[in-house]
Structure formats: structure tokens, C-alpha cells
Amino acid sequence: SQQGEEDPQALSIQEGENATMNCSYKTSINNLQWYRQNSGRGLVHLILIRSNEREKHSGRLRVTLDTSKKSSSLLITASRAADTASYFCATEAGGSSNTGKLIFGQGTTLQVKP
Amino acid sequence: KAGVTQTPRYLIKTRGQQVTLSCSPISGHRSVSWYQQTPGQGLQFLFEYFSETQRNKGNFPGRFSGRQFSNSRSEMNVSTLELGDSALYLCASSLSGHNNEQFFGPGTRLTVL
């Protein structure tokens, strides 16, 4: 079952604009991770945010986590054509029985037009 | 460090056959997880191995199995292939599998005819 629900499902913007993607989940988590996937290839790890963190930055990426609302957002600033890809959030549910198991959302397809 | 590697990259099989996929994790990583990705179901967790032991398993039939070797390399096997097994199979490695980043390989694209 998919724990993460991502919004929007598709996003089309112009180069230089910012892109925001949202993710909601259902259960308590240890962490939430964001990934990028280009055309059915492997997943590229972008950022991990733990349940006790509220915000993290990595280059042009900013991730926020609100555990009270069970939601996260990924902001890509000053987007480039090379950012065109599908973006997934994935949660590691809380508890010791969930080791090594990520539950993925359906993803957001981002198109950045040059 | 070299990334996660998976072999083969592409496979074509027929119904009823079996297949073995291989995954080599990042050096020092002891946890290997496997996922299936299909257009209809998205990314779904298959199982996770740590120190040669399966610690976690997803909701897949017993035709899907795996193992991990002492060098942390892992294999997954699918027996009696069905058309619905056509998918991208991804493995991911992490240091311990608990509250760590998971790094993915390029995947094996399996087509069942």
C-alpha cells in the first residue's frame, strides 16, 4: 500500500521558476526521503529529513517536515531543464519492525521548459 | 565510492521461467532492500536483508525470494514467472537499514513474454 500521497501529480514550469511538491503520509515515521528518477532509471537520493527535524537544505533544494500534519514539501529553486524528472517521497515508518523498508508515494512529474 | 550496481540491466524471459537478479551494495553498507516498480502499482517494497538475514518482507507471493552473502551482495529470485512480473527491479543499500539514506542502483528491467 502507498503511504505517501503526492501533490500535484504533474507540474510544468518555466526555467528559472520555483517548483514545490507536497507529500502526505499516514503513520508515524523515523524519516522521510526525497528521490528523483529520470525516465524509468534508478532513483537518485536527494535528501533525508528525520522526524525530529523541521527543515533541511541542500543546494537548490529545501525540504520541510510537519509531523503534526503528516506532511512534507520539496522546493526546488531556480529550476533548470535538467530538473525535469519524477520526484518521489518515501517514508520509513516508525518502529524497529520497519527497518530497510521505504513506502513510496506515486510521485510528481516535473517538466521544466527551457 | 562506487555506487550500487545491479546485473543484468535488462532481461527478457517467458512465462514459467525463473530469473535471478544480482545487487552489489556500496562498500561498507550492510543492508540491502529490493523494490519492484510498475506503472500501475508504483514502487513497492519486496524485502530487506542485513547480515545475511531477511529482516523485513513485503506483500509479495512466495515466488519472490532473496538472499544475501557474507560480502553483503544480494540476489533475488523470481520463480514461475508471470506476465505481471514485468517491472523495473531496484535494489538499494544503506549502512544499517534503520534511519539511514537508501541509495539505489540503476535497476534491472525484466520483461516477461
Image: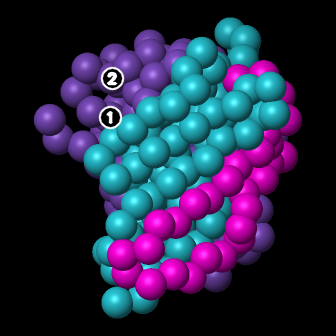
- Residue, x 17% and y 41% (percent of image)? B2
The correct choice, above or below, for B67 with respect to A45 in the image is above
How far apart marks 1 and 2 lie (CA) works out to 6 Å
Residue A63: x and y in percent read: 51, 41
Chain bearing mark 2: B
Please provide percent x and percent y for residue A113.
Answer: 42, 88
Disc 2 residue type (three-letter): His
Q: Which residues are magenta?
A: A1-29
Subunit bearing disc 1? B
Q: Please, is residue B67 above or below residue A63 in the view?
A: above
- Residue A13 on the magenta span: yes
Respond whether the residues carrying marks 1 and 2 are from the same subunit: yes
Q: Residue at x 55, y 21 (%)?
A: A53
Residue at 71% across, 70% down: A9
The chain coloured cyan in the image: A
Q: What residue would you read off at disc 2? A: B29
Query: Contact (CB < 8 A) between labels 1 and 2?
Result: yes
A35 horizontally vs A98: left or right: left
- Residue A50 appears anywhere in the view: yes
Badge 2 density bin: few <14, some 14–19, many ≥20, Cα 10 Å: many
Q: Amino acid at mark 1?
A: Pro
- Residue B25 disc label: 1
The residue lying toward the viewer, choosing from B70 and A50, is: A50
